Image (tube, rainbow, N blue to C red):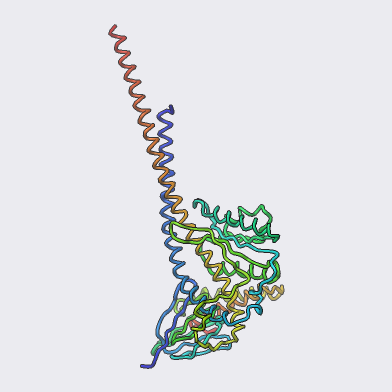
Amino acid sequence: MAETIKLEVVTPNGAVLSEDVDIVTAPGYGGEFGVLANHAPFLSTIKIGVMTYKKGTQAEQVMISGGFCKVSDNQITFLVESAEFGHEIDVNRALLAKERAEKRLAAARQQQEKINQVRAEAALQRAMARLRAAGNGA
Amino acid sequence: MPSLKDVKTKIQGVKKTSQITKAMNMVAASKLRGAQQKMENFRPYADQFNAAMTSLSGSMETSQFPLMESRAVQSVELVVVTSDRGLCGSFNSNILKTAEKTIKRLESEGNTVKLVCVGKKANRYFRKSGKVRKAFVDIMGNFQMYNAREIAQDVAANFLAGGSDQVQLIYGSFKSVGVQRPASRDFLPIRPVIDEAAASGTEGVDYIYEPSPTEIMDVLLPLYLNVMVYHSMLEVGASEHAARMNAMDNATKACSDIIKNLTLIYNKARQAGITAELMDIVGGAEALKG
């Protein structure tokens, strides 16, 4: 049995996940990074995207948005504003949200509204991350 | 002496009122449980967040972050968080009183004061004062992080643009089911979180930072504001329900007191009526005999 690392995902609505896993892959500031057991202390910001963890032969995908993650004492903690399991995501809703966000983005670009553009972009990223986590690669 | 019918109607009216207050009491109790649960759920996030902030901010110059920069204070912004609904005793008016006092104090020190009202009650109270910069209403019912984020972003943007030099948060803090107190805390500029353990150097963990600590702080500081706003919204939510529960409990008790008194009056009036009728009958019978 390989060594494991404790994975915790905490959101403002409570702890979502607390499990011993083999490997965690997450979208960090400088791109995807993987964490195995006994990783050195590490602190990184997290981009909107898909976090993957493996436990034995089982892999699970979780959509996470904005926050940061901390690795210390063989424990990895994600502090994110929201986290959703891939199998719990409503694909149709995410698809609709993606279309909506694309429209808003186009409209905002035309009118040169900086704030709306940023918001629409974030919404689009979230929708796409959801789809990816749900396994409907976009 | 009120007539029998008047008293009876009144008793029925008060009974109905007490039914309503009792129902409201029970609704508030169950909502309080929900709100407390939310606070409970939020705690690990806040704790972890503070821990990370502590380990980061202790080692850094604060002046390089615009959100932490302390300026000479000329204009102060108050974020007043109240509930959207009333009928919860003196809970909202206590917060508003504290806000009013703070405004007076700040103005006497020569500052200009602007307000951001969160919750209908604050907005109604201050809307005619001309000090309200922005109001967020109808968001206290369901506690969503994005509501808190919107408020935090708006306040921070105004602070960065120079619209305010200092921001304070005034809200109702939840001490226990029986006790809720108005409280205020500094919001902006953000003060470095200093923990004794970290300050004395017992925390020897050397993190690898990605990106640099400074850039991480740039991301964390706005999030920290979200956390603060969200926290105060949760506290106000829980306090509101606790306060309403107590207020409605008192109202129900007052109702049963009134009903007791009215029933006494009713019975007295009824007896007096019967006695009078008997006297009439007896009087009539005597007259016939004669």
- Image label count: 0
Nearer to me, B19 or B201: B201
Q: In which quarter of the image is residue B115?
A: bottom right
Nearer to me, A122 or B173: B173
- Quadrant in which the C terminus of chain B is drawn: top left
Residue at horizontal 60 percent and vertical 68 percent from the top: B187
Nearer to me, B188 or A110: B188
Q: In this view, does B270 lie to the left or right of A95?
A: left
Residue at horizontal 28 percent and vertical 8 percent from the top: B289
Which residue is farthest left? B289
Residue at horizontal 66 percent and vertical 70 percent from the top: B157
Residue B119: % across, % down: 57, 59
Q: In this view, does B142 lie to the left or right of A121?
A: left
Residue A40: % across, % down: 49, 91
Residue B125: % across, % down: 61, 53
**Residue B222 in sight here:** yes
Q: Is residue B276 left or right of residue B43?
A: left
Which residue is farthest top? B290
Nearer to me, A71 or B111: B111
Q: Quadrant of residue A15?
A: bottom left
**Residue A91 in sight here:** no
Which residue is farthest bottom? A2
